Image (cartoon, rainbow, N blue to C red):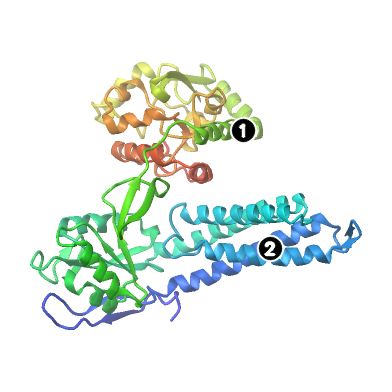
Amino acid sequence: MTDQETTHQRASIIPSQRGRVAPQPIAAGSGTWWRNYSRRVAVTDALAVLAAVAVAYLVRFDISGLATVSGEFAPTYLAVSITLAGAWLAALALGRTRDRRVVGSGTAEYSQVFTATWRLFATVAVIAFLFRMEIGRGYLGFAAPVGLVLILLSRLGWRRWLHRRRRRGDMQSSVLVIGHRDKAARLIGELHHNPLAGYAVVGVCVPTGEVSAGEMVGGVPVLGSMNHAAAIAESIGASAVAVTGADTITSETVRQLGWDLEGKGIDLALTMTLLDVAGPRVIMQPVNGLPLMYVDEPRFTGGRYVAKSMFDWVAAVVITVTLSPLLLVLAALVGLTSAGPVFYTQERIGKDGRRFKMIKFRSMVTDAHSRLGEVLALEGVDDIRMFYKPKNDPRVTKVGRLIRRYSLDELPQLLNVLRGEMSLVGPRPQVDAEVAHYDRAAHRRLLVKPGLTGLWQISGRSDLSPEAGIRMDVSYVENWTLFGDALIIAKTAKAMVSAAGAY
């Protein structure tokens, strides 16, 4: 059976026993899609690695590959290239970069590819130094970035391919959820909130007597009690069993559930009650067999922030120089098509509550601020404590409507980044009226510099609710990484072109 056979379904018969129900249909191929997908990704990984070492080899020598260095023939480097390619592919495999639990969603897949690559090349460099091996730094310095870019681009292509199929309900990992009714319903909602993550909850097991078998929890049928969870998971062909908090689920219960699932190819997942805490801040340390989870406190100073500031400044310079012709054209359009200044500045609240003037291309008429009450009255809005942006704002000029649609009016904020007032990626810059009503969670936005772009920019922009925007900003503040920043910048370009949520 192939992963293309998504319209066919089979029925899994669960023996009629107390606390169980029969039969439940699940999508065919739900447990086999990953093996086919992984093989395809492995092929493109191999092609990317071979292309990188081949190009590095040809750059090191002449195009014929027969040049000599210090009297030694290039075939010596050919052996090095073959060995490096094999080690690279092994590092990607051992680094679990194609694990079904990380592919298709989030940054973990890309991060693991990056980590496996730099560790390999760091190891090669150290070995070459210690044993005085004649491996040119230019050869390694060329092969590593070229190969990394090719691998990441191929992974991005496969992810988009995977997402297209998941939108059709294909290539999902079927999950059996275990826990109390309310907590199980909450977990089901979280898993189904993002269909591109590829989790399809096919059943629920609850404590005995809490819910009758056959009833629905979170839109998913109850298949039986927790006592029969392992047998039910195997019967319905689940890919994973997800356990959410319940008083009746003791450590011994989870331990025995793990034993029952051994050898069946079914993952056991335990959910944390902590929300928006990313993996880098979580450290697992066993103590006498008890898995103790430490959560690092978020840090807002130190070397990581120095590196972020350097990245911001260098990238802002490069982007500004690259886009300078476009910036000049936009400035001319704004200045020639409506009366008023080219730029619009507004006081915003930055890191640690410091005020600064945020710069944008003017997209409204010059008396826009005095007409705000009029526009809000037409929209039926009387509470603007949180950021509100009217969809059909009569104050926006014709050119302004165009540049706002594609977020081009935000580009002058590159100057704020160069002045150190903003970051390329960060929380949304807020006005004083909003900050005045911050609660403790929202106030954490001010622990870092606001961003020209951020999670809000790639997740719906003005279509986001204030609550969702705050949650995303706080999550970013406490869990950001430079690699994550690079991905957000890349996704921002896509969001600008699609213009979703922009008005």
**What residue is at 70 percent from the left and 55 percent from the top?**
143
Residue 472 or residue 483, whichever sits in front: 483
In three-dimensional space, the C-alpha distance between marks 2 and 1, rounded to whole angstroms, equals 32 Å
The residue identified by callout 1 is 314
Q: Residue at x 76, y 54 (%)?
A: 132
Q: Residues within 10 Å of mark 1 (few under 14, many from 20)?
A: few
Coordinates of residue 294 in the picture (x, y in percent)? 34, 47
Q: Quadrant of the N terminus?
A: bottom left
Residue 306: x and y, percent? 54, 31
Residue 205, by quadrant, is bottom left
User: Tag 2, which secondary structure?
Assistant: helix
Say whether residue 304 is left or right of residue 374: right
Q: Residue at x 38, y 26 (%)?
A: 430
Task: Give the residue displayed 67% in from the left and 56% down from the top.
Answer: 124
Q: Residue 447's x, y, as percent?
A: 39, 29
Instruction: Out of 61 and 25, give the one closest to the viewer.
Output: 61
Can you identify the residue that label 2 sits on?
84
Task: Judge from the rendering whether residue 307 lies leftward or rightward of residue 55; answer left or right.
Answer: left
